[in-house]
Amino acid sequence: MIFYEPDRRDKSILSHDPFKALIAPRPIGWVSTISKSGAINLAPYSFFNAVADTPPMLAFSSNGKKDSQTFAEETGEFVWNMPTWDLRENMNITSASFPQGDNEFPHAHLEMAPCRLVKPPRVAESPCSLECKVTHVVPLKDVDGNACINTMIIGQVIGVHLDERYIDANGLVEVTRMKPIARCGYLADYTVLDELFQMRRPR
Ligand SMILES: Cc1cc2nc3c(=O)[nH]c(=O)nc-3n(C[C@H](O)[C@H](O)[C@H](O)COP(=O)(O)O)c2cc1C
């Protein structure tokens, strides 16, 4: 077993930082937002997860003040769209650095569908989208209290869009048929959720 502090790894053993390869898979926050002036944005964030369920809350973390953070802060709203195996190339296109104000939907050959309770559009092709209102904008700090480059945006889910074709006769969502993709490390690694196993909690 080797031990190291994150900024002092032996690069002759670990040529690349394995952090993102170890915390894997990470679900992808495919975040759509709209600015105050109406500019539409769509981008993937893998520093993303569900962080609570009562009420349901999601968080994504922006490495520098990118458009998704800017727009979510401006309007207090964002939408999470599930990126799936079928939508993997479209999702990837939305990670390109388009100029602010340039809508990623047409670039990625995606249709916008309206949301019900928030202004940003959702990805029409995605089998699930969650409408969120921002509850916290948290500038991250390190253990010495120094400001980090990352800001975490937390939002409460206030609306759920779900393609009913994935709901089974028992009222359960067949997520393995949706095939969500998730991020692994290193630069280009992903996985797809197409299998589950069951294990009950001990009494
Ligand atoms: C799968 C994937 C995951 C990503 N995760 C993050 C992330 O967690 N945080 C981040 O700042 N950028 C992340 N990026 C990069 C952003 O998507 C990229 O910088 C994008 O241009 C940001 O768009 P925006 O400025 O329109 O919000 C990720 C890219 C990909 C392809």
Image (cartoon, rainbow, N blue to C red):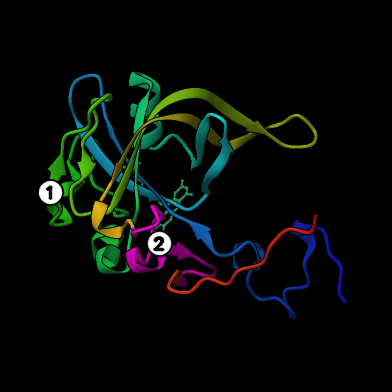
Q: Is residue 135 above or below residue 147?
A: above
Under mark 2, the amino acid is: Val
Where, by quadrant of the figure, is residue 4 drawn? bottom right
| Residue 68 falls inside the magenta stretch | no
Viewer-side residue, 30 vs 202: 202
Left or right of 33 in this view: 72: right
Disc number lying in front (1 or 2)? 2
Viewer-side residue, 44 vs 135: 135
Mark 2 or mark 1, which is nearer the start of the sequence? 1
Residue shown at 80% from the left, 33% from the top = 144
Where, by quadrant of the figure, is residue 88 drawn? bottom left
Where, by quadrant of the figure, is residue 194 drawn? bottom left
Asked if one can make out residue 153 in the rendered structure from this viewpoint, the answer is no
Residue shown at 53% from the left, 58% from the top = 26
Residue shown at 19% from the left, 30% from the top = 39
Asked if one can make out residue 170 in the rendered structure from this viewpoint, the answer is yes
Q: Which quarter shows the N terminus?
A: bottom right
Q: Is residue 197 above or below residue 146?
A: below
Under mark 1, the amino acid is: Glu
Mark 1, secondary structure of its residue: loop
Q: Mark 2 sits on what residue?
A: 175
Dominant SS of magenta comes to loop
Q: Position of residue 175 (x, y in %)?
A: 40, 61
Q: Mark 1 sits on what residue?
A: 111
Report the span colored magenta: 168-190
Residue shown at 79% from the left, 59% from the top = 202
The alpha-carbon separation of the residues under discs 1 and 2 comes to: 22 Å
Left or right of 8 in this view: 72: left
Q: Residues within 10 Å of mark 2 (few under 14, many from 20)?
A: some
Viewer-side residue, 51 vs 26: 51
